[in-house]
Amino acid sequence: MGQVVVKVNGREFALSCTDGQEPRIRRLAQYLDARVGEFAKTVGQVGEARLILLAALTIADELSDANEALQQERARAQAGSAADAAAASGIRSIAERIESIAARIESS
């Protein structure tokens, strides 16, 4: 089990994590600390819990927007795949008709 110490709003927190995840946890904590710092500059030191809550809500909102955009892109890609399949089917159908006409012309 890995151990990492992160600093948020000037306060250190010791955390346990899966081995190898320490750099990721540090990076995430730095992002959180930056967001907390933004709120501290805007609203002042209104309490650690409130600052962290504001930062967490903002980050959750960003994540929600990103997930929504990803879902829309996946839906667009699936619709595109369905349209591609329909187009390919249509092209096959036209090719079969052309071959049928060509066969009739050859047999005449």
Image (cartoon, rainbow, N blue to C red):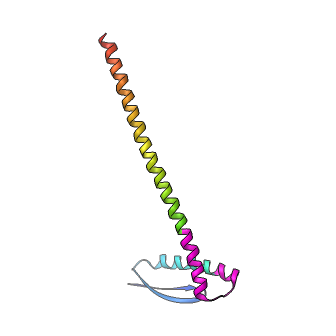
User: What residue is at 42 percent from the left and 44 percent from the top?
Assistant: 82
Residue sitting at 49 percent across and 59 percent down? 70
Quarter the N terminus occupies: bottom left
Find residue 55 and report its image quarter: bottom right
Q: Is 66 placed above or below 8 here?
A: above
- The part of the chain drawn in magenta is 37-62
Please state which of residues 34 and 69 is positioned toward the viewer in this rendering.
69
Compared to residue 67, the image places residue 25 above or below, namely below
Residue 63 percent across, percent down from the top left:
53, 68
**Camera-side residue: 71 or 40?**
71
**Residue 82 is one of the magenta-drawn residues:** no
Q: Is residue 9 left or right of residue 16?
A: right
- Tally the numbered discs: 0
**Magenta span has 51?**
yes
Examine the rendered structure and indicate whether residue 1 appears above or below residue 72. Answer: below
| Residue 68 % position (x, y) | 51, 62
Name which residue lies at 57% across and 81% down.
53
Q: Residue at x 35, y 18 (%)?
A: 102
**Within the image, what quadrant is residue 89 found in?**
top left
Question: Which secondary structure type mostly characterizes the magenta part of the structure?
Answer: helix
Q: 41 or 11, which is in the foreground?
A: 41
